[in-house]
Image (cartoon, rainbow, N blue to C red):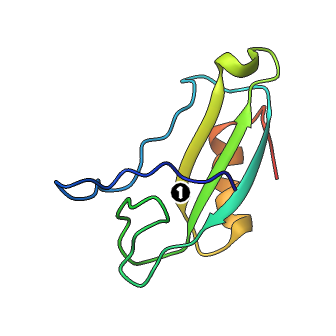
Amino acid sequence: MPKLEQVSCKYGAPMGRPGDHPGDDPQCRIRVRRVHLDSGGYDEGGAYWGHGAPLWYASGVDEFEGARSYIEDFTRAYSKSAAIAQWREQWPNAKVW
């Protein structure tokens, strides 16, 4: 997984991270990886997610749009296959693995 950008600062940490993806259905391969959270519920870049189901990260580049359309999203699911199913439903034309 790419290193998550540091987001904590002297004013504290943000709640989670925003996704970055097109509003429509991307034509791309999206890779899913688990995000490790420390015992306090923070990711490696300092964003706070709290506790609960494991956190999953999806990323890819739209094959038709190139680097201009980088996809990045986060979700909670109890298994990788459940997270993949969520993204496949959201983006039926993407190849999520």
> Which of 31/40 is in front?
40
Estimate the x, y position of residue 39 in percent, counting from the top left. Answer: 42, 85
> Which of 22/34 is in front?
34
Q: Residue furthest front?
A: 10
Q: Is residue 71 above or below residue 76?
A: above
Q: Is residue 40 above or below residue 49?
A: below
Q: Secondary structure at mark 1?
A: strand
Q: Residue furthest left?
A: 11
Q: Quadrant of residue 90?
A: top right
Estimate the x, y position of residue 78 in percent, counting from the top left. Answer: 59, 75
Q: Which residue is mark 1?
A: 75
Estimate the x, y position of residue 64 in percent, counting from the top left. Answer: 80, 15
Q: Is residue 49 above or below residue 78?
A: above
**Relative side of 8 to 81, left or right:** left
Residue at point 27%, 58% (across, down):
13
> Which of 43/94 is in front?
43
Residue at point 63%, 34% (across, down):
71
Q: Quadrant of the N terminus?
A: bottom right
Task: Tally the marks.
Answer: 1
Residue at point 39%, 75% (across, down):
41
Estimate the x, y position of residue 85 in percent, counting from the top left. Answer: 70, 56
Q: Residue furthest bottom?
A: 39
**Relative side of 62 to 6, left or right:** right
Q: Is residue 36 above or below residue 24?
A: below
Q: Quadrant of residue 62?
A: top right
Which three-letter amino acid code belongs to the residue tagged 1? Answer: Thr
- Categorize mark 1 by other alpha carbons within 10 Å: few (<14), some (14-19), many (20+): some
